[in-house]
Image: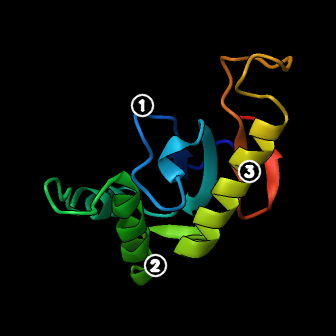
């Protein structure tokens, strides 16, 4: 994987409080999922910046924003090159990868891991990566 190309990642992170989502996405621990290679950075930034934050709207949260942003990127044919941005695939693979890391005791201090490095997964190649 050439390091000179920008990549788009989706991140899962832990947050305090009770889960607010039926699938408990907002209780999972931090991982990075590479979902695409950036073809046009300016276009990508424009699409992401124009994806609204809908605070105050019932049921809306950051996961809703990611889904909407990925849906907009799917419609656009120029912002990303090679990518996997279908919401169900991204969500399911991200949750599965995070669960594997949890099962390996990546987050509870029982494993021997470098806590400065975030676990990362390349969804296009379907393999763990070092970033």
Query: Where residue 32 sits: x, y (%)?
Result: 61, 43
Q: Residues within 10 Å of mark 3 (few under 14, many from 20)?
A: many
Nearer-the-camera pick, 28 or 116: 28
Residue 102 visible from this viewpoint: yes
Q: Coloured how? A: rainbow
Instruction: Identify the residue at horizontal 70%, vertical 41% (top origin).
Output: 120
Q: Earlier in the sequence, mark 3 or mark 2?
A: 2
Location of mark 1 (residue):
16
Query: Where residue 60 sits: x, y (%)?
Result: 27, 61
Q: Residues within 10 Å of mark 1 (few under 14, many from 20)?
A: few
* Label drawn at residue 96: none
Q: Is residue 66 above or below residue 3?
A: below
Q: Residue furthest front?
A: 18
Question: Which type of secondary structure does the marked residue at label 2 adopt?
Answer: helix
Question: Which type of secondary structure does the marked residue at label 1 adopt?
Answer: loop
Q: Earlier in the sequence, mark 1 or mark 3?
A: 1
Location of mark 3 (residue):
97
Q: Residue furthest left?
A: 56
Query: Where residue 92 sits: x, y (%)?
Result: 65, 65
Where on the picture, by quarter, is residue 126? bottom right
Q: Is residue 123 above or below residue 10?
A: below
Image-based side of 85 in relation to 54, left or right: right
Image-based side of 8 in relation to 105, left or right: left
Q: Residues within 10 Å of mark 2 (few under 14, many from 20)?
A: some
Whether residues under marks 1 and 3 lie with C-beta atoms below 8 angstroms apart, the answer is: no
What distance separates the C-alpha of mark 1 from that of mark 2?
31 Å
Location of mark 2 (residue):
74
Q: Is residue 112 above or below residue 37?
A: above
């Amino acid at each position: 994987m050439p390091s000179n190309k920008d990549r788009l990642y989706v991140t899962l992170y832990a947050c305090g409080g009770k889960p607010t989502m039926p699938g408990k996405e907002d209780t999972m621990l931090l991982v990075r999922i590479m979902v695409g290679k950036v073809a046009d950075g300016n276009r990508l930034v424009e699409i992401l910046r124009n994806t609204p934050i809908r605070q105050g709207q019932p049921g809306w949260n950051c996961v809703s924003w990611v889904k909407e942003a990925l849906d907009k990127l799917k419609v656009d044919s120029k912002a990303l090159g090679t990518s996997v941005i279908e919401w169900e695939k991204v969500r399911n693979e991200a949750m599965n990868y995070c669960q594997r890391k949890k099962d390996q005791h990546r987050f509870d201090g029982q494993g021997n891991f470098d806590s400065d490095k975030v676990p990362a997964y390349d969804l296009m190649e379907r393999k763990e990566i070092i970033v």
